[in-house]
Image: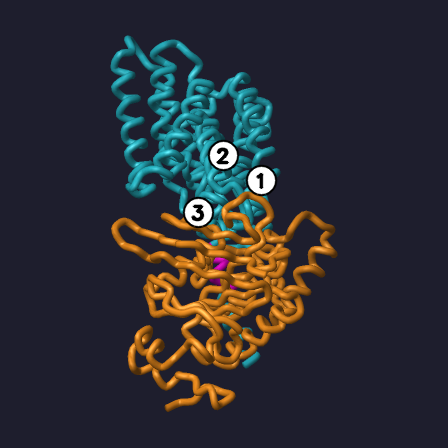
Chain colours: A cyan, B orange
Amino acid sequence: MLELFTYPFMQRALVAGIIIALLLGWLGVYVISRNMSFVGDGVAHASLSAVALAILVGFTPLPTAIVFSILLAIAIHALKQKSSISFDAVIGILFTTGMALGIVLLQFHEGYVPDLMSYLFGNILTINTSDLWWMAGVGTLIIIFLATARRPLAFLTIDPEGSSLAGIPTKRIDLLLTIMISLSVVLSIKMIGIVLVSALLILPSASAKLLARSFHQFLVSSIILAVIMVLVGTILSYVLNMPTSAIIVLSGTCIFFVSLFLAHLRSLEKKESTTSSS
Amino acid sequence: MAIIEVHNLTKRFGQVNALEDINFKIESGDIVALVGPNGSGKSTLAKLIVGLDTPTSGTIHIHHEPPTKPGVPRVGYVPQHFALDRTLPMTVFEFLHLSLPGTFSRSVEESIVTSALTRVGIAGLQSNILGTLSGGQLQRVLIARVLLQPHDILVLDEPSASIDVGGEEELYSILQKLNKEDGTTLIIISHELDFVFRFATQVICVNRRLMCRGIPKEVLTKDLLESLYGSHTAHYHHDPNCDHHHHQ
């Protein structure tokens, strides 16, 4: 089995997997705590139009999707601030419009579209060295932002009103967070696909939230669980000869149910100790 | 010396006037009770004073500057409803750490947080998760949080709303001590007239408009209380010949 680590495509997939697990595991903490789960899903689906546009005009899809994701995040943020309609509805409109636009644009492309299925469901065979450089470069910028803005992000998560009073530029931080989520989602599309990418934002952080006893533990365990989810899923998919993205998501689902079980056991233990002490 | 000056303040939400032409000044070191019936605009006024909202017309000045001016906030605020996600695993220490004015060594941070928690009577809760606290404990954590910053004015929106009767008395003693020891000016929204008569040095009554302003014993007349709250509150009317309010 160890020969799998000698294959260049598998080495690229594992490096890409660790980068996106770091990003989505960290961002997932803010995404599920601030009820932004739909943002990741929306950005991923809407970015199909960027991928389609890139295929149509012959650009490289990943850089095109990166630029598009920044514009999309700015549009989501602006609509959220100015519009009287709900945030979910805003994402829903962009989500479906982007996807529909992508399908229409692809109709103008003559001949076979080899990349499309790999963008929809992910394909580790399509991750090339150039993609890895993009992931490493943009990923480093996102991690620098997350590390330096850790305190305001936590403040904004627990108490938006209080953080505004404390002088934190809440709207700016909110915009930057939305951009970072969009960028991370787009970076992950080749690995896990448009349809399933939001699972990496939600499953590790939802599992970590069940087990953590502090915000610091929540953050660290979300990142660790995301890395485990991606590595186990990628290796298992090779061993079982199954689609990688689906096995990654199912590994995450298993981690979530194990966490749920452990959290339940802990609450039972707590109840027992309370009963015996009283 | 007036540290808060409110001139011709009006706040409108759509077609509805929440506050109309409010004028008052608050002197440094006062304990001000802000009273009025439900929906009278008290919480709106509090949010305008702390800079969480802006007036439709008129002005508010804190130390001669608008409350929304960027910089170190000097008005601490304890909201009536703190929308806490009880499933979020954040400890009391982590929560208070977010409000520390700067970065210090871990031991200094722990000692600052412990000292604030001790002042509000809940030392030892640092490691507890916020979501596991009772309403009263959470209220004290919120008060401890504003103590971490160098505020000279505190605005508290119904601070005793989720506290039991014994805890209420203790809370007001803590606030009174804060006023005496640090000279902190307190603006407390309260429905409890008992508190107003016993602790407040000034009272401001609003019911969209300013209804009264002054020393509680002098301005909270039976007629005014009836017009604010209805006839059932008349028993709280203070008799100037007695030291304590009496029940008629």
Residue nearest the viewer, comparing B54 with A68:
B54
Residue in the image at 44% along x and 71% along y: B190
What kind of secondary structure does the magenta stretch mostly adopt?
helix
- Quadrant containing the N terminus of chain A is top right
What's the residue type where badge 3 is placed?
Arg
CA distance for labels 1 and 2: 10 Å
Q: Secondary structure at mark 3?
A: loop
Residue drawn at 52 percent across, 49 percent down:
A163
Foreground mark, 3 or 1, reads: 1
Residue A13 location in percent, x, y?
A: 52, 26
> Which residue type does callout 2 highlight?
Leu
Please identify, in this view, whether the residue under mark 3 or under mark 2 is nearer the observer.
2
| Secondary structure category for the residue under label 1 | loop
- How many neighbours does mark 3 have within 10 angstroms: few (below 14), some (14-19), or many (20 or more)? some
Closest to the observer: B85 or A217?
B85
The residue pinned by badge 1 equals A149
Q: Residue at x 35, y 76 (%)?
A: B224
Q: Which residue is mark 2?
A: A176
Task: Report the quarter where the C terminus of chain A lies.
Answer: bottom right
Question: Does the image show residue A222?
Answer: no
Question: Which callout, 3 or 1, points at the residue further toward the start of the chain?
Answer: 3
Tell me the subunit letter for badge 3.
A
Residue extent of the magenta highlight: A260-266
